[in-house]
Image (spheres, rainbow, N blue to C red):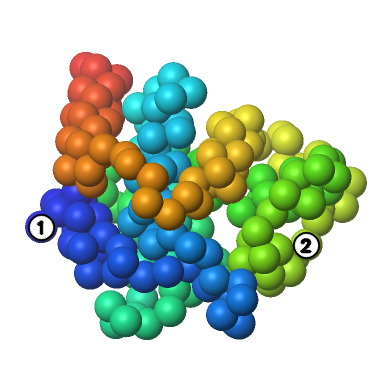
Amino acid sequence: MDIVCKIEALFERRGATLYSGEHLARREAVTALAHALQCAQLAEWAHADNTLVAAALLHDLGQLLDGAAEDALRNDHHELRALTFLSGGGFGPAVLEPISLHVQAKRYLVATDESYGESLSLASRHSLALQGGPMNAEERLLFLAQPHASRALQLRRWDDLAKHPGKRTPPLAYYLDLLDAVLRDSQQVKRVAVA
């Protein structure tokens, strides 16, 4: 089974799960699939390239990897679990690095923009505490030195906005086609680089 089929299977099996913290009051009102689709749509509306749209769709995929369909989503180190899963499928750094950095981007934004922290949902505030809280000055410098930090910051903003119950988006199949195109483009670049 290729990586796009595996991604589709994950969304079919666990995509209806709601985001939640330890307490029901921290629960987000959108499912994992709705959140992913909204985030990808926001990236498209911002005229992001296909690799960043793919990252927006896949940024929380690590939360879907473990557990039964009815189990709660796991927030701890989900960005690293996603990388392990996706890196073997042919996605390059333009997709993988924003995913890798999107949790750090939240920590950076909370440390540098007071209004950003105030705008976070209860579930996002809860996960922020688990993820290390606001970055200190040294962590901020290290984050900004990452080649894909600006793309991760864009992704983070869309991530926070993609939480509207019932919002209309293109279907998953539309974005799966986009993933196929990203992978084809990646393979062409690799062939040209070898030739």
- Look at the picture and state if 188 lies above or below 72: above
Q: Position of residue 72 (x, y in %)?
A: 43, 79
Amino acid type, residue under disc 2 in the picture: Gly
Q: Pointer 1: residues within 10 angstroms few (<14), some, or many (20+)?
A: few
Amino acid type, residue under disc 1 in the picture: Met
For this orientation, the residue located farthest to the left is 1
State the residue at coordinates (85%, 45%).
114
State the residue at coordinates (78%, 62%).
133
Q: Are marks 2 and 1 in contact (CB under 8 Å)?
A: no
Q: With 160 as the anchor, is 32 left or right in this view? A: left
Q: Answer with the quarter of the image where residue 116 lies.
A: top right
Locate the C terminus and report the quarter of the image it occupies: top left
Q: Which residue is mark 1?
A: 1
Q: Position of residue 119 (x, y in %)?
A: 72, 49
Of residues 41 and 131, the one drawn nearer to the viewer in this rendering? 41
Q: With 150 as the anchor, is 81 left or right in this view? A: left
Q: Answer with the quarter of the image where residue 188 lies.
A: top left
Which label sits on residue 133? Answer: 2
The Cα atoms of the two marked residues, 2 and 1, are separated by 38 Å
Q: Position of residue 96 (x, y in %)?
A: 44, 43
State the residue at coordinates (24%, 33%).
178
Kind of element beneath mark 2: loop
Q: Pointer 2: residues within 10 angstroms few (<14), some, or many (20+)?
A: some
Q: Which is nearer the N-term, disc 2 or disc 1?
A: 1
